[in-house]
């Protein structure tokens, strides 16, 4: 038994869970081609959720701040991307793939930039006065969330907004019998790039070193003379920017967005962060993959259980590992 | 034994006087206000005082942040509604449905509590939020049981129906007392009022009991409470279950009064926001503060819209501003008020007046 668990942990331990899930799902689904389609959808969805969740997780890990207003960045990202895409409509439908790509990248960049700016404002005005007071933190960020949602309603109106998709990213291609949407591949690749950059920054730069040290023991890093609060504002901005990027991607994926997009995603993001363990990027990725895959498989097998299945997954993980699968903070 | 003598505080007097006044107005509400809408407001205040006070048990007295309180409220309401719809209008249906709803709330609260109250408060907030949203989805998906988005409309026992007359005059109409007909509507109002009052008194008794003191100790310093020998997890789970049961009972009252139960009135996230605002406005950790919070907030919901309509028409020439002053955007301003309150008056109206704000 011990030898088995040692073998398992050598091959990745809990990181194997998405793989195990995919393998279990294959016989249940039956058809290989639909399994491939669902798996691709799950991975793409997981990557987009990862974008949204990673920032929240880091912000919490570094400063013990849980931002219930995180979903506001997701919503704003989605709506800004939709507006930019609508503004560049002529770029989208021309045959020029470069313009197509430029339009979507511009939309994502606009959303991300706004996320960073809004994050700066949010940190300065909303969160800073209530550091180290969890109760008031939750209350204040919920208040900010209410305001942000109302602002979106005031600016973009209450009816759903259609998000145009560039010609190059619409449609799908076929491998064997399985159809895979191009947009999903795009989302997956973008997520992978972000994950790569985040890992590089966290593991290979001095800033990343400080962030990781701060997550592990903030007081010690402060005692050594580093200004954690300055670092924190950078992390907060990056986290908000990533959330807005995730929101922009999600808007393109859904095609039709309404003001509640943020709060809908926030539930999934919370589940991911709890499953993965607070404060760790790898944990967020793992949790997001599990949630994305399980969500898609269950939506195919038992459509009504989709959201509840993620809830059950979270409960199971909490029972097994109360601090999540790969926590960076053990407090 | 030394009893700390309280210095005479005018703030305390004001708060108690205001709460007493609100109580009196609620007691005579059917005779003071004859129009239907005002009575609806009065009944809503009664039910929400119970709901908000039970939430205050968690957030104010114990320091637990839960977002699942509407879930328990909704369980009570839906239990009653489903039973009244399925078994017909009888007291047996209210009893059975209410009990089922309360039992479901109790079991769910116990499970959530055991599972996640041992971890950080912030974790708990996330778990409850997720649970509440799943319940909301379930309620709209199990539409053959819950009526989906449309909700359930049903009739209540004959005693509570407007057609029920206690005293009839020569023409067969209900006898009027101070201009109010003595009919079933009066009966259901007093049913709601008395039940709310009893539940509220029960909670007042609870926070004055040794258990209430332990809860406050847990809020102030969890480690120290544990070190003295109180089982923090057990106390937290217990108070979470108690609050859930009381919230479910409030849900039963709401369902009986409204004769309608749907996601918007019993389960939606906006009710949770209302509860949060009411608790913070009234004052966390003060039972009677919840009465003030509910009254202020409920009146504001009707009053603020008129003010905003006026503001929107004044600023009609300026771009964007009229949109912000649109009566539908009242939540925006309440949200702003909420944040300012949390920053500057974390003790709320009652807490600030009674001098609790200087505790830290």
Image (tube, rainbow, N blue to C red):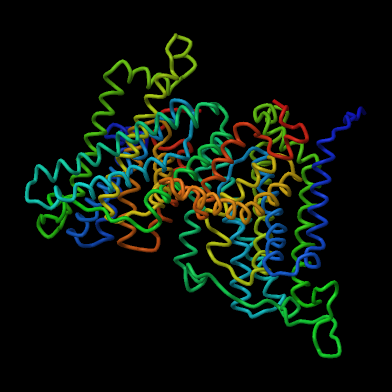
Residue B114 showing in the rendered view: yes
Q: Position of residue B291 (x, y in %)?
A: 73, 49
Residue B108 showing in the rendered view: no
Residue at screen point 21% across, 49% down: A184
Given residues B302 and A31, the one toward you in this image is B302
Q: In which quadrant of the rendered image does the N terminus of chain A lie?
A: top left
* Total count of labels: 0
The answer to which image quadrant residue A297 occupies is bottom left
Given residues B144 and B182, the one toward you in this image is B182
Query: Would residue A171 appear left or right of A84 to someone viewing this image?
Result: left
The answer to which image quadrant residue B63 occupies is top right
Query: Would residue A288 appear left or right of B334 to someone viewing this image?
Result: left
Query: Would residue B58 appear left or right of A201 to someone viewing this image?
Result: right
Q: Furthest residue to the bottom?
A: B171
Above or below, comparing residue B218 to residue A209 in the picture? below
Q: Position of residue B324 (x, y in %)?
A: 47, 47
Query: Would residue B73 appear left or right of B326 to someone viewing this image?
Result: right
Q: Furthest residue to the right?
A: B1
Given residues A164 and A30, the one toward you in this image is A164
Above or below, comparing residue B193 to residue B184 in the picture? above
Q: Position of residue B259 (x, y in %)?
A: 63, 72
Residue at screen point 80% across, 64% down: B32
Q: Furthest residue to the left?
A: A95
């Amino acid at each position: 038994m011990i030898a088995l668990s040692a073998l398992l942990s050598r091959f990745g331990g809990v990181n194997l869970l998405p793989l195990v899930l995919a393998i279990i799902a294959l016989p249940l689904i039956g058809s290989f081609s639909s399994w491939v389609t669902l798996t691709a959808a799950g991975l793409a969805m997981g990557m987009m959720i990862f974008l949204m969740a990673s920032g929240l997780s880091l912000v919490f890990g570094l400063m013990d701040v849980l931002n219930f207003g995180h979903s506001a960045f997701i919503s704003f990202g989605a709506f800004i991307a939709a507006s930019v895409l609508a503004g560049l409509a002529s770029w989208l439908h021309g045959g020029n793939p470069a313009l197509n790509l430029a339009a979507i990248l511009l939309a994502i960049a606009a959303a991300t930039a706004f996320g960073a700016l809004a994050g700066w404002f949010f940190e300065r005005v909303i969160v800073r006065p209530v550091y180290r007071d969890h109760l008031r933190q939750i209350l204040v960020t919920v208040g900010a969330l209410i305001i942000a949602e109302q602002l979106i309603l005031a600016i973009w109106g209450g009816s759903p907004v259609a998000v145009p998709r560039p010609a190059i990213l619409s449609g799908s291609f076929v491998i064997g019998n399985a159809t895979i949407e191009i947009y999903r591949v795009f989302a997956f690749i973008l997520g992978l790039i972000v994950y790569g950059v985040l890992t590089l920054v966290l593991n290979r730069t001095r800033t990343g070193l400080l962030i990781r040290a701060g997550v592990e023991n903030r007081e010690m890093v402060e005692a050594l003379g580093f200004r954690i609060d300055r670092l924190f504002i950078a992390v907060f901005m990056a986290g908000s920017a990533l959330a807005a990027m995730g929101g922009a991607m999600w808007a393109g994926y859904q095609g039709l967005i309404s003001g509640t997009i943020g709060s809908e995603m926030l539930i999934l993001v919370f589940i991911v962060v709890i499953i993965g363990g607070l404060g760790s990027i790898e944990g967020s990725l793992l949790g997001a993959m599990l949630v994305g895959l399980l969500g898609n498989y269950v939506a195919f097998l038992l459509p009504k259980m989709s959201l509840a299945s993620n809830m059950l997954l979270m409960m199971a993980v909490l029972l097994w590992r109360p601090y999540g699968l790969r926590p960076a903070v053990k407090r | 034994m030394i009893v700390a003598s309280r210095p005479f505080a005018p703030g305390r007097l004001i708060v108690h006087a205001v709460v007493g006044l609100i109580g009196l107005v609620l007691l005579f509400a059917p005779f003071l206000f004859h129009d239907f809408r005002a009575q609806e407001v009065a009944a809503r205040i009664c039910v929400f005082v119970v709901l908000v006070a039970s939430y205050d048990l968690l957030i104010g007295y114990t320091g637990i942040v839960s977002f699942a309180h509407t879930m328990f409220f909704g369980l009570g309401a839906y239990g009653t509604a489903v039973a009244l719809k399925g078994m017909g209008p009888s007291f047996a249906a209210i009893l059975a449905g209410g009990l089922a709803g309360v039992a479901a709330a109790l079991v769910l609260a116990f499970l959530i509590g055991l599972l996640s109250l041992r971890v950080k408060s912030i974790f708990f907030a996330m778990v409850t939020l997720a649970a509440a949203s799943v319940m909301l989805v379930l309620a709209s998906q199990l539409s053959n049981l819950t009526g989906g988005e449309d909700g359930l409309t049903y009739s209540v026992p004959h005693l509570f129906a407007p057609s029920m007359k206690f005293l009839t005059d020569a023409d067969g109409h209900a006898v009027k007392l101070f201009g109010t007909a003595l009919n079933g509507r009066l009966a259901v109002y007093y049913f709601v009022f008395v039940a709310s009052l009893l539940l509220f008194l029960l909670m007042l008794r609870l926070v004055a009991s040794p258990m209430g003191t332990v809860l406050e100790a847990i809020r102030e310093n969890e480690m120290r409470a544990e070190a003295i020998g109180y089982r923090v997890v057990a106390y937290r789970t217990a108070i979470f279950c108690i609050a859930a049961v009381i919230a479910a009972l409030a849900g039963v009252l709401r369902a009986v009064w409204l004769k309608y139960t749907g996601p918007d009135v019993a389960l939606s996230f906006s009710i949770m926001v209302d509860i949060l605002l009411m608790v913070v406005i009234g004052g966390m950790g003060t039972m009677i503060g919840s009465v003030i919070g509910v009254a202020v907030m409920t009146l504001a919901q009707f009053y603020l819209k008129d003010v905003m309509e006026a503001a929107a028409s004044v600023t009609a020439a300026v771009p964007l501003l009229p949109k912000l002053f649109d009566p539908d955007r009242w939540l925006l301003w309440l949200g702003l008020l909420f944040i300012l309150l949390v920053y500057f008056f974390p003790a709320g109206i009652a807490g600030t007046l009674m001098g609790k704000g200087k505790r830290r």
